């Protein structure tokens, strides 16, 4: 025990020395709050070993911060008392390509006695990954990142308002090569910064909405996937700043338009074998994979309170906007909330599923942890996937949707929060402290925007994530 601690101390010192020699001055330690905002403490590089040993102080009150920096309270959290320690994950320390002199590490939160903080979202994601492993399941996950880029306004960069004109630096059509030509230096710098930082970029393309792009990155274990999406977002933000641009990851940049999703891809393995490639099984899904996906599908109304956590999320969640607003699944169906991607038949590793409904206001650690919890509950309760849906449920009449058993997912944050409140499996998985803090934040966000018009909600949240 003692020698392991000494070894870790030695490794942390060597890492700090290497960073300093590379010219790194500061290390940003991030964690993501329940409103989906990456909060930070930074330490000088030479203090990294001390931070890894003793942690860095941060108040537990951030668990009940809302996206507009107001503070609410839950039964267990809120108020000025107490302190937590942020411990950087030294395995993930990354020198930041677009912030010279800076490195980054995701942090886990413990109390001052060294016990895990019960509302630590990153440890929740790890606990659920371990729970899956105890059931013999390995998960690979990855988030897509969509963002809208505008020119940074002259003057105060925080200037925002419902009537703020968005100044797009590209005018080309959706998915058009023109946009890539217009922003070729910027987009090259985004991909270069990501790959220098060890992020494996799979694709980058212009998306549907004005100024919108998407980057997809390689899957990894669930905690890594959540860390990666934080790093990807902050890297895009930093490259944007260096180009005089601004990146919005908000669910609804302009009310009424197609929004930014943050779809979660997942695949299941047992003993290194994909459960999406089972010979003779429907859609190649092994029974456990079918039950796991059935569990996710069934829990989607409650999961929305985690994956779509802002009133702005519900501006994005419109039928026929590719955001997956109906509780159904489909094979390669981009209007289904749960899309099965079968992949090329000769790809032994191919095949995975995509939760399309989630957006980037979600805390990604909560999203992956809750999806795993829902999937495992699906296996425990021997859930089966219903029939898949083809086509856009949004264009069917109410009667036809009812005939097919297709239900609309919550259309408001209140409804999603109510479903989370009643979800026994998610309550059990998250624990009372985390579950209660998330609900308190959701209720406060609802109350804050209760009287706001759609345009005002979009404007107020446009630059928050
Ligand atoms: N932007 C869409 C969304 O809100 C997704 C588009 C796509 O299918 O990638 O999720
Ligand atoms: Mg997309």
Image (cartoon, rainbow, N blue to C red):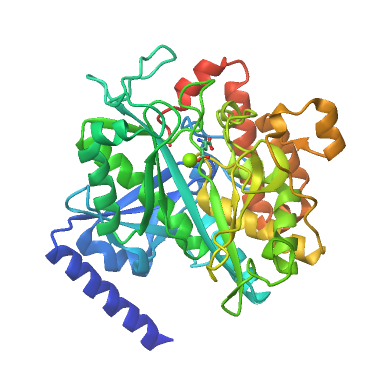
Apparent side of residue 127 relative to residue 253 in the rendered image (left or right): right
Which quadrant is the N terminus positioned in? bottom left
Point out residue 155 in the picture as x, y percentages from the top left corner.
Answer: 23, 19
Residue 250 in picture, x, y percent from top left: 46, 33
Q: Nearer the viewer, residue 191 or 450?
A: 191
Quadrant where the C terminus sits is top left
- Residue 46 lies in quadrant: bottom left
Q: Residue at x 70, y 47 (%)?
A: 329
Q: Nearer the viewer, residue 298 or 207?
A: 207
Give left or right: position of 327 versus 245. right
Can residue 272 be spotted in the picture?
Answer: yes
Residue closer to the observer: 265 or 86: 265
Q: Residue at x 29, y 60 (%)?
A: 94
**Picture quadrant of residue 309:** top right
The image shows residue 454 at horizontal and vertical percentages of 56, 18
Rendered view: 39 above or below 431? above
């Amino acid at each position: 025990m003692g020698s392991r601690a000494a070894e870790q101390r030695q490794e942390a010192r060597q890492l700090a020395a290497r960073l300093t020699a590379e010219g790194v001055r500061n290390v940003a330690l991030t964690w993501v709050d329940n409103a989906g905002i990456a909060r930070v403490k930074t330490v000088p590089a030479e203090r990294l070993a001390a931070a890894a040993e003793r942690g860095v102080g941060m108040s537990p009150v951030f668990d009940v911060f809302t996206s507009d920096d107001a503070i609410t309270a839950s039964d267990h959290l809120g108020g000025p008392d107490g302190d937590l320690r942020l411990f950087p994950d030294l395995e993930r320390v990354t020198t930041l390509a677009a912030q010279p002199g800076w490195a980054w590490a995701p942090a886990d939160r413990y109390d001052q006695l060294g016990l895990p903080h019960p509302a630590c979202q990153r440890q929740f994601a790890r606990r659920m990954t371990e729970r899956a492993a105890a059931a013999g399941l390995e998960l690979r996950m990855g988030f897509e990142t969509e963002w809208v880029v505008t020119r940074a306004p002259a003057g105060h960069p925080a200037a925002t308002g419902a009537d703020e004109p968005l100044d797009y630096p590209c005018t080309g059509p959706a998915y058009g090569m023109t946009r890539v030509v217009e922003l070729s230096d910027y987009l090259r710098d985004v991909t270069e910064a990501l790959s220098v930082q060890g992020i494996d970029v799979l694709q980058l393309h212009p998306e549907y909405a004005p100024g919108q792009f998407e980057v997809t990155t390689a899957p990894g274990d669930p905690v890594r996937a959540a860390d990666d999406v934080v790093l990807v977002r902050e890297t895009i933000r930093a490259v944007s700043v260096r180009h005089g641009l601004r990146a919005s990851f908000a669910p609804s940049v302009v009310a009424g338009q197609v929004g930014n999703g943050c779809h979660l891809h997942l695949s299941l393995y047992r003993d290194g074998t994909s459960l999406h490639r089972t010979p003779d099984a429907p859609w190649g899904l092994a029974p456990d994979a079918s039950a796991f996906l059935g569990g996710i599908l069934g829990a989607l109304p409650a999961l929305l309170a985690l994956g779509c956590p802002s009133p702005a999320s519900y501006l994005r969640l419109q039928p026929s906007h590719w955001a997956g607003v109906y509780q159904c699944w489909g094979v390669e169906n981009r209007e289904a909330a749960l899309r099965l991607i079968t992949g090329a038949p000769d790809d032994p590793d191919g095949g995975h599923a995509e939760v399309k409904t989630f957006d980037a206001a979600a805390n990604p650690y909560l999203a992956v942890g809750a999806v795993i919890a829902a999937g495992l509950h699906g296996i425990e309760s021997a859930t089966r996937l219903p029939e898949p849906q083809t086509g856009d449920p949004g264009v069917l009449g109410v009667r036809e949707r009812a005939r097919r058993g297709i239900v609309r997912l919550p259309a408001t944050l209140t409804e999603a929060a109510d479903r989370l409140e009643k979800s026994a499996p998610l309550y059990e998985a998250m624990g009372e402290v985390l579950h209660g803090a998330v609900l308190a934040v959701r209720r406060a966000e609802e109350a804050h925007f209760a009287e706001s018009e759609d345009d005002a909600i979009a404007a107020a949240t446009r630059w928050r994530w």
